[in-house]
Image (cartoon, helix red, strand yellow):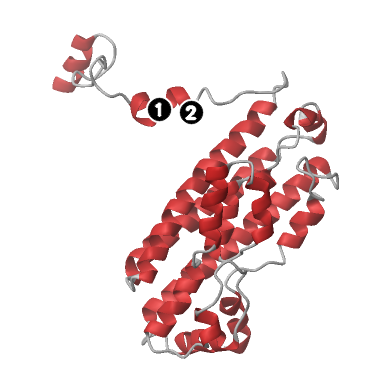
Amino acid sequence: MKNMNDKEQNGSGLEKNIQTDFEKSMSYGDYLHLDQILTSQHRCSDHHDEMLFIIIHQASELWMKLILHELKAATKCIHDNNLEPSFKMLSRVSRIQQQLIQSWNVLATLTPAEYMEFRDKLGQSSGFQSYQNRLIEFALGNKNVHTLSVYQHEADLYEQMQQALHEPSIYDEAINALVARGLPVDQEAISRDWSQKYAPNDSVEEAWLTVYRDVEQYWDLYELAEKLVDIGHQQQLWRFNHMSTVERIIGNKTGTGGSSGVTYLKRALDQHFFPELWSLRTKL
């Protein structure tokens, strides 16, 4: 009966030891800086549904920040030939991707008529300009120097993007892990211009085939490969949901940033990550 008595003595329904005085202590809101986060939704119109549009994209950017945090750490682990810790990080990335995929279902509640009420207020701003999404693509190996022109107006960001463009992707490090285990890979696949999009290589496919044909000997490399396949698959699902949601809301209109809209997004679906990890499946 002690707990019940504590609640009764408190008179508010709170347990006796729950902290209520934060004049000199850090609260939940302080720790998360909620005063900044929750006051960062500034509608450019009076339309009710613009709030949905803003929050979906802001929340997505937060999830992307976490993806980049995990990918950077996982890539370093692979570079250091310390594969096991990377598996947890990569599993987390795929779970985050699932959250991003589901977010399109929420945005799809926005009808074309509702979106057109405030679309013109967006000006030239577009999701195409998301530098974090571009950094994720770079980290996974889809490099494209021409996309950097979008960020020239911000010197610090442009420099960050240039650095990411010239760093090896997580797949480049995975290929180096194959070499470290004695599997033969052509020099052109491991000593190349990292700023260029990765091109499939027969020797890399053969090395991965060796891994898949002898899972017991190469279990860690096999698990790494499957983690990457999962991430590549989820990224394609995210792209597809993005494309289908845009098509549902604006049809084949030109994007606010000047892209061809749905046509551009459909072309992106043809760009696969980690190509040999997909092509080897036909040969197993």
Element type where label 1 sits in the image: loop
Q: Secondary structure at mark 2?
A: helix
- Rendered view: 253 above or below 36: below
Taking depth in this image into account, of 17 and 267 the one nearest to the observer is 267
Separation (CA) of disc 1 from disc 2: 6 Å
Residue 168 in view, yes or no: yes
Q: Residue at x 58, y 66 (%)?
A: 195
Within 10 angstroms of label 2, few (less than 14), some, or many (20 or more) residues?
few
Which amino acid does the dot numbered 1 rest on? His
Where is residue 39? Give x, y as percent: 52, 22
Q: Nearer the viewer, residue 203 or 21?
A: 203
Q: Pointer 1: what residue? A: 33
Q: x and y percent of residue 87 in the render? A: 39, 65
Near mark 1 (Cα within 10 A), the count class, few <14, some 14-19 or many ≥20, is few
> Do residues under tags 1 and 2 come within 8 Å of each other at their CB atoms?
yes
| Residue occupied by mark 2 | 37
Residue occupying the far right of the picture: 252
Residue 124: x %, y % from top left: 75, 37
| Three-letter amino acid code at the position of disc 2 | Ile
Number of disc labels: 2
Residue at point 46%, 91% (across, down)? 184
Q: Quadrant of the C terminus?
A: bottom right
